[in-house]
Image (tube, grey):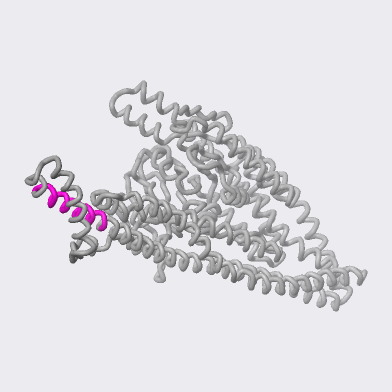
Amino acid sequence: MTTPDPNGPVARLLRYANEVHALAGRCGRKDLAEVLAACAARWKDECTDIVVAGAQKRGKSRLLNTLVGHPDLVPVDADVATNCFLSLRRGPKLTAVVHRSTDAGPVQLPITVESIPDYASMRGDAGKRRDVVSVDITLDNPLLDGLRLLDTPGVDSLTVGHRQVTVAMLQRADALLFTLSAQDQPVLRHELEFLAEAAERVQAIAFVLTKVEDSANWRTLMEENQARLRTFVTEAVAENPARAVTLTPLLSAPWIPVSSKLAEAAEAKRREGRLERADALRARSGMDALERHLRAFAEGRESARGATVVAAALSVLSSLSTTAQDDVAAGSDDEGDVTARLAQVEADLEGLTELAARRRAGAVANTFLGREVAGIVAARVAEIRQPYENAIATLKKQEQVDRYMAELPMSVQRSLEAAWSQIVYDVESLARRTLDAFARDLGLDPVEFAADPSAMPNLSQVQVRKDASADVPGEVDMVRDVLPSASIGLSLGGFAASLLGPVGFLLVAPAIGAAIFMGRRSMEKVQRNQAAIRGALRDQFAAVSREMTLDLERMVATWRVGVEQAADESLMKRRKELEGRRAELKAASARSAADRRKARESGQDRIAAIETLTRRGQELRRELATAVAALGAGQEASPAAP
């Protein structure tokens, strides 16, 4: 890494971080000093880390494969596994290494590239992906020179573990590519909330609109996404003006429309020697514009990392300010200053007592969440079951029954899988509304949690069979079966006799009766099979409904316990801090006049230093934000036509 300009923003930033680190050390806050040390430790890393995030089915994994020129490298048919991420960096050859975290310590396991989905995909082998932290993939691609691409779990399928992994990756990210699809619904609330959280940690952000090749209105969808983002940022800043610093830059982040499909087609044409056509498809794909942005992020990584350091420093200064103000009040010659400070602390403690009571009442209300799950499951399963009931009623012939039966198990499984995604969404929405309201009532930030639609009950047991007895002839009832058929046959046979004579009557009447008898038996067989199918479906749907309900009740209970534990920990931490401040203030008031004066002067000096450092940090942050916003400036995205 080149030596930074001593008067440039990077050098000034490093000096600034060292000053804040030293101040935290002088104040006895080793914990805060370590936060800055961890941020500054990445300066020696000359590889730019770019996190690629987005919801499932937004084209994220296929985009990565296209960028590195290996269509089947990263699994695209399933999400990245919980607690896992994939790292793609440059190396002399194509390799893959699994990193595991075990009780005995970290373990590295070289694997074949073909087996990556077994270890890194939600549809892989559960035994193999256990304890997997990451899969490190190397390949010789010039694009990755100085770049490391990090593929993370989908932001809509996040279990607690999923979200923790993705957010943790943002801590080490120099830039973020957030994918949205031109063929799916516009950006959703949970995606916007993730972006807000990401913007707290990363300033270099670009939006990638995938799958533009088959969408005639991708520009309209992109404008709608941008409008939703503006509305979200405006409302968030109006509610909390302090968030303007981190959220407003999202509005100027670049949007890059791309098509992996067109880029892959371009490579195919190039292999065929049709270079002119290949170049045209490549230009329409938008991949060149995206690669230019990636290179710009790499070249400007110091500015991006600097923004992260400044954010951490400002947070440290805010924490140091409270203690300094307490020392000034405790050392004041006016006893009223200490009294007022103590009164505020006591009022805050009383407020915590009230919050604890509300927390208990809210926890009781939260227990009813699980009971609402069964109703959601029953309603959704009934919706998908009705079309099957309607279809069964249309089966009139045995060959129709047989054909329907052959297709039924897979059809039911697909329907249940689709229903599961919607059910999970309904349950998650209900839980989020309820638990977010619980958190807000306690003065807490919304607790992040989400379901994993891929972690559904095992539906491989779907085995809908018609009743075996429907295929068995069974006993013939002379009164019910034979006599009516014979009677009808004689009646029709009399008509035949008038046309064919006695011989015709003797030949035709039994044949007609037999045909009617067999037709009736065939119809009854179909009816028995219809009833058997209905019964089997009823039993199958009931069993799956029970499994879904049980899994979702467990899921909701886990969320509820997690939110309530987070509330308890937050309340306990706040109480401990307030009680510590109260003890310090009381002890300070009992000191000698000289000691109080010394504490006051020390506090005043620290407050002055904190205010100065805070102003400098805000100036640096604005300067770095401008530098980050300029990354990739002039790199116009290709108008990827459909």
Residue 20 seen in the current view? yes
Q: Is residue 175 left or right of residue 416?
A: right
Q: Is residue 115 magenta?
A: no
Instruction: Write the residue at 91% across / 70% down.
Output: 336
Q: How many marks do you count on the picture? A: 0
Instruction: Write the residue at 44% across / 32% down.
Output: 213
Up-down: is 419 above or below 285? below
User: Quarter holding the C terminus?
Assistant: top left
Q: Nearer the viewer, residue 286 or 402?
A: 402
Where, by quadrant of the figure, is residue 429 drawn?
Answer: bottom right
Q: Nearer the viewer, residue 221 or 49?
A: 221
> What is the x, y in percent for residue 358?
71, 71
Residue 49 seen in the current view? no
> What is the x, y in percent for residue 27?
72, 65
Query: In the current view of this chain or complex, which residue is farthest to the top?
Result: 276
Q: Is residue 518 magenta?
A: yes
Instruction: Write the residue at 60% across / 66% down.
Output: 563
Q: Is residue 247 left or right of residue 344?
A: left
The boundaries of the magenta stretch are 507-524
> What is the x, y in percent for residue 466?
28, 60
Up-down: is 642 above or below 354? above
Q: Nearer the viewer, residue 498 or 625?
A: 498
> What is the x, y in percent for residue 8?
65, 40
Q: Main secondary structure of the magenta part?
A: helix
Instruction: Write the residue at 52% across / 30% down.
Output: 637
Q: Is residue 96 left or right of residue 555?
A: left
